[in-house]
Amino acid sequence: MSVKEQESKSLWNHAWDSLKSDKMTVFSMGIVGFYALIALLSFSGVIVSDWAKEVGDSYGAPSSEHLFGLDIFGRSVVAKTAKATEIAMSVGLITGLFTVVIGVTLGSLAGYFGGKIDEFLVWFYTTVSSIPQIMLLISIAFIAGKGLFTVYLSLGLTSWTGLFRLIRGEFIRHKNREYVQAATAIGGGDTRKIFKHILPNVLHIVIINFSLQFQFAIKSEVILSYLGLGVQGVPSWGTMINDAKLELARGVWWQLGAATAAMMVVVLAFNILGDSLRDALDPKLKGK
Amino acid sequence: MAEKILDVQDLVVEFKTDRGVITAVNGVNFEVYKGKTLGIVGESGSGKSVTALSVMRLIPNPPGRVANGQICYRGENVLDIPIDKMRTIRGNKIAMIFQEPMTSLNPVFTVGNQIEEVLKLHQTELSRDERAKKSIEMLRLVGIPSPEKRVREYPHQMSGGMRQRVMIAMSLACEPDILIADEPTTALDVTIQAQILELMKKLQNEMGMGIIMITHDLGVVAETCDDVAVMYCGQIVEKADVKTLFTDPKHPYTKGLIESIPSFDSTAGEEKDRLPTIEGMVPSLFDLPEGCNFQNRCKVASEKCRGTHGEPKLEAVGSERMVRCFHPLT
């Protein structure tokens, strides 16, 4: 009799296997990868560095040469959309990182230490989240001035509350677990317990939240730019949609179409990815 | 007499609750000797786990607090040691095994990783390779087959008994002086229990550490301990060496406990069908009676026990044994 030997797999191996097995997820990962590639290429100037160049007539209709037509200044809408992808992805990434750093730090401090620290941070979090987010975004944008940096800052400073709440809750749940007590019993200090023991156990929440935050930030950037508070001087899906207000009356639909389609696809892909990540990483949902 | 490594004196631990302050451990004294096992027996809520946790200074504070007493490890009061230094003692000199092997290992790390962590904390001179080697060695020592492979497994791939072996490997990795085992076999089934106890005994003989065995199972006590302290309502009610305790219990509570162990031999009397029990309930720690804490369940309680004579003191009866009773059994 021979027992087949099984290599032990970590949670991440399991999660990867489960992600790989779902076609929709792989497809979404492909889309996200494609967007990231475009953003990187555009960022490094390999493509669309000449997006502002006039390549034809004002409001030229879609053709085989210019797939989504031209805008008021005769610039290629495809190039603009690609350039805007760079903006959108950078906003997603940077606000996502902001959220993770602020949310995880404050959440773990509040949850782990409790007491006065917890009271203060919870008060702070309630205050921030009681202000309607769009109002907060607008006021920060007004204070910090318009521009891309403001978008990062305002989204980063407002969007950590959800993750904070989750992480705080998980830390409260985990800090009394026996394995944490066992970690104390072998001589581990607070820092070690927070980062080495509890954090890896709640990391899946961070990852899921990051993927959802990413697409939320993209949408928010579009809204801010649409309202004229966002990116200046470079194309953004929001400003493209804003431009379309005047264009639609003339029957120029392509700028609106390109921006909306680009945004919809990436947001949808991130949503699907976020869902699959949750299924793959949250042990409570395993085997569903 | 063996070397005394731990000396606990007048330990009082209090917990603040919404309904007031309760004294979970009330004036406990005991000693642990090198190479010997001290059993602390008692039912749930008698304060045995709290006693063990306070030796490690693991009482959650607040709400808990060591209100009085001394815990001297090799002459140094553990309660006065600054927390940084305490960390170098925990896991290194005094180690602990917990009741629930299913939950006391971190689920996201391999077991090897977790044994190595103890070494990383306390034996900083070891290199990464040496740590890895030692963790395999520890797993072999606790009787885990093919440790080279097992060391890379996660806790969920192991059974309860295996995990408890890993816990033991972790706690013994730095060859501690004292091992505190808080109900190490309660969550395991009986055959595994026997294996784990045997393993602990064997390792004790090899390493010579003192063990504090916390349990509510008198069978475990009989098998593993040299000395026994019986706890009731946060106090030690009887302390004796294991043989004397079982053959000649002096406290009515101890006697009740021993009588309520199921026995295979039914020749002793006609009414052996029903297992004797200790009637009544443990009094609430919020509302302890005046006099002896055991009075409401005691068969020999007199007016003296219920009255104003105060609590009975833990007094020596004969040599080497102590009883807290006004009417010790003869």
Image (spheres, coloured by chain):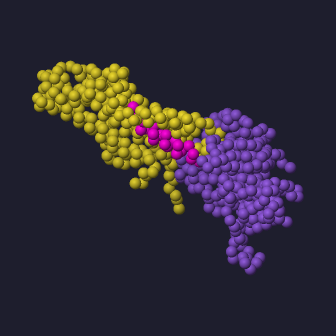
Chain colours: A yellow, B purple
- The relative height of residue B228 versus residue B87 in the rendered view (above or below) is below
Nearest the viewer among A166 and B196 is A166
x, y percent for residue B188:
62, 59
Which image quarter: residue B241? bottom right
Quadrant in the picture for the C terminus of chain B: bottom right
Q: Please state the extent of the stretch shown in magenta in the rendering.
A: A158-178
Nearest the viewer among B99 and A2 is B99
Q: Work out which residue is located at the far bottom of the displayed protein and give it.
A: B270
- The relative height of residue A179 versus residue A249 in the rendered view (above or below) is below
Nearest the viewer among A210 and B7 is B7
- Residue B243 visible somewhere in the drawing: no
Residue at left 22%, top 20%?
A: A52
x, y percent for residue B84:
67, 34
Image label count: 0
Residue at left 16%, top 27%?
A: A246
Residue at left 80%, top 64%?
A: B302
x, y percent for residue B279:
69, 67
Position of A49 compared to A125: left or right? left
- Residue B307 visible somewhere in the drawing: yes
Which image quarter: residue B285? bottom right
Residue at left 67%, top 35%?
A: B83
Asked if the stretch drawn in magenta spans residue B202, the answer is no
Asked if the stretch drawn in magenta spans residue A167, the answer is yes
x, y percent for residue B125:
67, 33
Q: Work out which residue is located at the far right of the displayed protein and give it.
A: B318
Q: Work out which residue is located at the far left of the displayed protein and give it.
A: A250
Which image quarter: residue B71? top right
State the predominant SS element of the stretch in magenta: helix
- The relative height of residue B307 versus residue A76 in the rendered view (above or below) is below
